Image (spheres, helix red, strand yellow):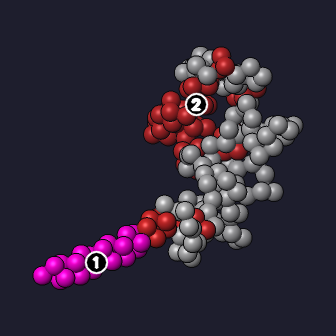
Amino acid sequence: MSTSLSVILKRFFYIFVVVGALTGVMLLFTYDIIKIDWVSFMEIQPAYGSQEDPLPVPAQSIPVEGAAYLPGMGEPINPVPADETSIARGAELFAINCVMCHGESGQGTGTVAAFLVKKKPADLTSEAVQSKSDGSMFLTISYGIWNPNNTLFPEVQFSGQMPPLNENLTVRERWDLVNYIRTLNAAQ
């Protein structure tokens, strides 16, 4: 009986050694001590982070919401009538996206304006802003105010100035903002 018990113990020992060795090898792969790049791993596929080298717009394509601006065709014309609905939407969008810099009255006295040292936000009620065409305001909202002399961070062209809002707002929302900004001068 003792012989069979010793044989059983030896067999259990060998089984535990084999299982332990297999577990050890699996743990080496699990904790990336030994790394094998499989084709299905997401990390070896081409990927882009947020705002990191976005792919160019395909040629001859039009956005789902329609063409907002065609280069070389002059300033766009406001297709949205300045009715109560548009102005109400514009006021809501202004409160969400613009008040922090331009202030509630649009005079450039928002909470963030105190921290902007080099370039203060524009006074949207001023004659200089109100005399611009709707298309010019639309382009400013869409593409921001660029700083081509920015050598510190050349990929960030709007350094310290108004950023573009074309990725945050739809075409219709930008036109609603233009219609609301027109009412700021009348409110004074």
Seen at 70% across and 28% down, the residue is: 130
- Compared with 22, 161 (above or below) is above
Total labels drawn: 2
Q: Is residue 70 visible?
A: yes
Q: What segment is highlighted magenta in the picture?
A: 1-23
Seen at 37% across and 69% down, the residue is: 20
Work out how far the residue at label 1 is from the one at label 2, CA to CA, in angstroms: 78 Å
Q: Is residue 22 magenta?
A: yes
- Compared with 64, 183 (above or below) is above
Left or right of 106, for residue 161: right
Residue at the spot of label 2: 98
Q: Is disc 2 placed on a helix, strand or loop?
A: loop
Seen at 74% across and 19% down, the residue is: 117
**Which quadrant of the view contains residue 101?**
top right
Amino acid at circle 1? Lys
Relative depth, front residue between 132 and 35: 35
For the C terminus, the quadrant is top right
For the N terminus, the quadrant is bottom left
- Sequence-earlier tag: 1 or 2: 1
Q: Pointer 2: residues within 10 angstroms few (<14), some, or many (20+)? A: some
Seen at 61% across and 63% down, the residue is: 47
Residue at the spot of label 1: 10
- Compared with 170, 102 (above or below) is above
